Amino acid sequence: MPVWSVVWPARSRFRVASVSKLFPIIGVLQLAEQGRIDLEADVNDYLADFHITNPFAEPLRVRHLLTHTDGFGARDLATFALRPDRLRPLGVVLAHDLDPPVQEPGRLITYGSYGTALAGHLVEQVSGLRFEEAMDRLIFGPLGMQRSSFAQDLPPDVAREAAVVYTYDESRGYQPMPPIYSNTPPTGGLRTTASDMAQVLIALLNGGRAAEGRILGERMAQAMIDRQFTPHPGLPGVTYGFMEEVANGRRALTRDGSGMGVRARVYLLPEQHLGYFYAQNSAGDAVVEALNRALLDHCYPAARPAPRPLADAHVRARRYAGVYRPTQTNDHTLVKIEALAVGELRVTAGPDGSLTITPLGMGDVWGGFAGSSTWVEVAPQLFQRVDREQYAAFGQEAGRHVTHLFSGAGYHGTYRKLPWHDGSTVQLSIAAVCLLVFLVTPIAWLSSAAFGTAPPQPGLARLARGLGAVVSVLDLVGLLGLAYALLIRRVAGFPAMAAGISSLAAAMLGVLLFAAVLGAGLAILTVLAWKDGFWSFWGRLHYTLLTIASLTFTGWLAGWNLLGFRY
């Protein structure tokens, strides 16, 4: 059973996950109003302690950080600490962890945390204050938000007002989570109350001013309401801080927070001067989505007529079919391996021109594609979901080849169309076949030795088999151990890598690297086996298959950033 307690709107402090991102964005806009930050300037102009390496011609501009068009890849690695004494200063975290953009800045929405964390660091650099202090001075103070803070280690009297975060276990029910501390507070470290957040909503809907004071001038406040970027003119886009959507025929803005065991949302209907703040101290989307739908249907009921597809949609439908992966997939570190479990979409075309979009693996994270859904083309490259008011669009290269899928819901994810061999199904199959060879090989050889079916062999042949067995076992242990150490093992309810690379994970990376070095010797021994006639024909064929599996597996590990210590 859930644990119930009294919630006081003015006193109960909730973690709000990515709703926190609104505040560094407001801070940057406030400094821009003062002439201390130029939104068009290169981010590096404001960084004193490190610089961003950008492989693209387009500079990484400050405004890109405010619209999730910075191009950075996701990095779900060491995002929190279990003890406050293990937290690092924001500038140190960014200098160590921030990799070059994986997409050209300003071109695509690549939702993630490090762009907003960098915006928070710009506030530090320009204001001369620590981020937590800057938020107090720029936002919380002017709005009278006395119970809001980005501080991670709360004093005991303040901690007593913090809502305990719970996780659900089928066997034990709701269990309190241990305290966790964000290494990038601007992206998800805010604790606040409903009453404090009400002041923010009032200010955003009232030209930057609430009863207590002003946080933005009217022009910058409007910039948080107006669309700043969209990948397709018919698709809901992003403002400075919010994601657009269409709800019962009305334009809505949302900022969702989901992570660290909580769920939160700020939702605005600007033209209706209405908004709400929602927070729950456990994970899950069901309640907030039901609330949102009920509110809209009660206050602004509207018929949702079936979308009318273009007459020639069936002519183009097949070009959109394929498997798509989020563009913020990390290209630089072992975090890339997450793509094999989370986030890919399969798009299939029907004979009538409709599309079916199906999340693969553990489901979609970024684009609001919940379950399998059917879509029809209502404008060139623009699709509407048949059972709800939701849109998606496709991007083409030179007007011919489809390259991207753009979502107009959720976190407005952008997905890159994959070649057939790069999808998770094919990639996992490659790994599975290699692991099967590694599993069968030592078992077969041990059985042969135990039952005396193998004729005596020269010393080099015995060395070849011994090396093959060692490589097989090391690759098996290394990959399975790494999967456990990074993803299967849980820390505070999250995959362990969210708390950093453990000594076990580092050891398993070392095992895989050692196996790859030894595996190079299998190729030489395979040539000698055929030259000198080791074993029978079938024995030499088996050894050749093992060598191919070892070399293929090494290439597979390198492709997924698992060869070496890439973190």
Image (cartoon, rainbow, N blue to C red):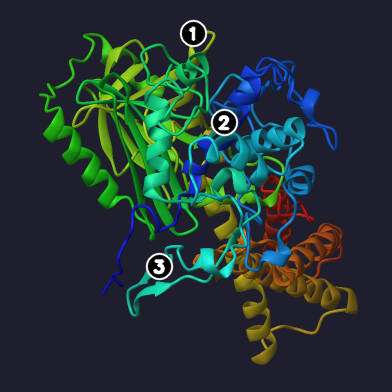
Image-based side of 192 in relation to 139, left or right: left
Depth check: 298 or 386 in front? 298
Q: Residue beneath label 3, please?
A: 166
Judge the density around disc 2: few (<14), some (14-19), many (≥20) Cα neighbours within 10 Å.
many
Rendered position, 332 above or below 70:
below
- Numbered disc in front, either 3 or 2: 2
Depth check: 116 or 101 in front? 116
Q: Which residue is rendered at x = 48% and y = 11% of the image? A: 400
Residue type beneath disc 1 = Gly
Indicate the quadrant where residue 41 lies. Answer: top right
Q: Residue beneath label 1, please?
A: 399
Depth check: 112 or 329 in front? 112
Rendered position, 306 above or below 556:
above
Q: Earlier in the sequence, mark 1 or mark 2?
A: 2
In the rendered image, the residue lying farthest to the bottom is: 451
Cβ–Cβ below 8 Å for labels 3 and 2? no
Q: Quadrant of the N terminus?
A: bottom left
Q: Which residue is rendered at x = 10% and y = 24% of the image? A: 303
Residue type beneath disc 3 = Tyr
- Secondary structure at badge 2 equals helix
Q: How far apart, in angstroms, are the residues tagged by discs 1 and 2?
A: 35 Å
Image coordinates of residue 526 in percent, x first then y, are: 80, 61
Q: Which residue is rendered at x = 60% and y = 31% of the image? A: 27
Image-based side of 565 in relation to 249, left or right: right
Depth check: 334 or 148 in front? 148
- Numbered disc in front, either 3 or 1: 3
Image coordinates of residue 135 in percent, x first then y, are: 60, 40
Q: Earlier in the sequence, mark 3 or mark 1?
A: 3
Judge the density around disc 1: few (<14), some (14-19), many (≥20) Cα neighbours within 10 Å.
few
Q: Residue beneath label 2, please?
A: 25
Image-based side of 478 in relation to 346, left or right: right
